[in-house]
Amino acid sequence: MQTVLVTGSAGFIGYHLSECLLRQGFSVVGYDGMTDYYDVALKQQRHALLSAHPQFTATEALLEDFARLREVVLAARPEIIVHLAAQAGVRYSLENPRAYVDANLVGTFNLIECAREVGARHLLIASTSSVYGANTAMPFAEGDKADTPLTLYAATKKAGEVMAHAYAHLHGLPTTCFRFFTVYGPWGRPDMALFKFTRGILEGTPIEIYNGGEMYRDFTYVGDLVRAIRLLIDAVPPHPSNAGPGVPGDTLSPVAPYRVVNIGNGQKVRLADFVDAIEAECGRKADRRLLPMQPGDVPATWADNRLLKALTGYAPQTPLREGVARFVAWYRDYYGV
Ligand SMILES: NC(=O)c1ccc[n+]([C@@H]2O[C@H](COP(=O)([O-])OP(=O)(O)OC[C@H]3O[C@@H](n4cnc5c(N)ncnc54)[C@H](O)[C@@H]3O)[C@@H](O)[C@H]2O)c1
């Protein structure tokens, strides 16, 4: 049985990924600091659900606690490490930038260092579409320059990618960095639009819509995202000296077993249309407060997902309306509304 270390296992994506891996017969070692960026009860419940599975164990500790992290990694000796733990959120990085430096720079360095020491077969690291920053050419492709981050969140995520490249090169540590595009679905994050809009609509309180609704996002259903991660686990980047002809658009580094892959739905949806879909599912109209563009926000994201398809034969496919329906059903059930 293969062991996978999942950092951020009590988080939104970490929970879904761990669940998927356990169902497929992997042994999952979770690691999560249970930070209070949002309701910790949600994180505890996700871990409690995973703990019902005999092949799941979890440690509650911060990535910054290097001694603890190292102890867990050396004891588990995972073949695969999926690093999802991070201080997430674009807007909060204006309020508390240091949290991003601690979790995403120091934390990610600690994790990469442990992956090297244990000799993991494949290290997979979550990055974000935010690294495309001020780029305007759409859709965003992995080969595009990503040197103009607009927030410290994006800057720390980009730094994680480049630190990982150096380790992949120096230590031959096969590494995939994925750039996620606005992930949504059941057990989602309370700081994200779908959660906030659903809560506002069901409670009859106003919802804040930035840039007057002239915002576009490539919404990616969490079940599709997790499936893509699962398939990418097997797409271990080869050392470039052993690589065959490769796949079109491959981002394989010329000097390291390292690549970057977008995981996005491949469609951009107007925020106002997204709100329409949530209203339809809730059976109520939203009280929309149109606000200006927020500092650090980008007007649009849209993934070129051809590399994901070329590497895995898979592309996300859940229609927005269906994904929103699954979220609203979960929300109503979870909060009893
Ligand atoms: N959800 C999205 O739309 C999205 C988009 C792009 C990238 N990402 C990235 O995907 C990953 C997972 O995101 P998510 O949406 O599941 O977020 P999440 O906040 O639900 O999960 C992150 C988990 O990491 C844990 N964590 C935070 N700081 C930690 C630390 N210093 N030490 C140990 N644990 C810590 C948190 O307690 C949390 O459970 C993150 O790396 C995020 O940056 C997410």
Image (cartoon, helix red, strand yellow):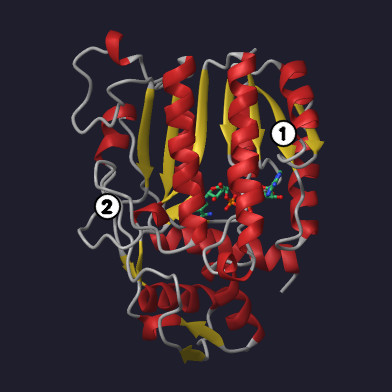
Image coords of residue 160 (percent x, y)? 50, 41
Image coords of residue 115 (percent x, y)? 60, 22
Which quarter of the picture shows residue 316? top left
Mark 1 or mark 2: which is in front? 2
| Disc 1 secondary structure class | strand
- Relative depth, front residue between 5 and 266: 5
* Local crowd size for mark 1, using a 10 Å CA cut-off: few (<14), some (14–19), many (≥20): many
Q: Is mark 2 within 8 Å of ligand 1?
A: no
Earlier along the polypeptide chain: callout 1 or callout 2?
1
Image coords of residue 203 (percent x, y)? 66, 84
With respect to residue 5, does 120 lie above or below?
Answer: above
Q: Residue at label 1?
A: 30
Q: Is residue 257 left or right of residue 12?
A: left
With respect to residue 33, does 197 lie above or below?
Answer: below
User: Residue 140 bears which disc, if any?
Assistant: 2
Which quarter of the picture shows residue 300? bottom left
Residue drawn at x 70%, y 63% as measured from the top left = 333
**Residue 233 visible, this angle:** no
Image coords of residue 61 (percent x, y)? 79, 40
- Relative depth, front residue between 11 and 109: 109
Residue drawn at x 62%, y 88% as measured from the top left = 204
- Relative depth, front residue between 67 and 236: 67
Q: Is residue 337 left or right of residue 59?
A: left
| Disc 2 secondary structure class | loop
**Residue 21 visible, this angle:** yes
Disc 1 marks which amino acid?
Answer: Gly
Disc 2 marks which amino acid?
Answer: Phe
- Relative depth, front residue between 233 and 260: 260
Image quadrant containing the C terminus = bottom right
- Residue placed furthest toward the top: 242
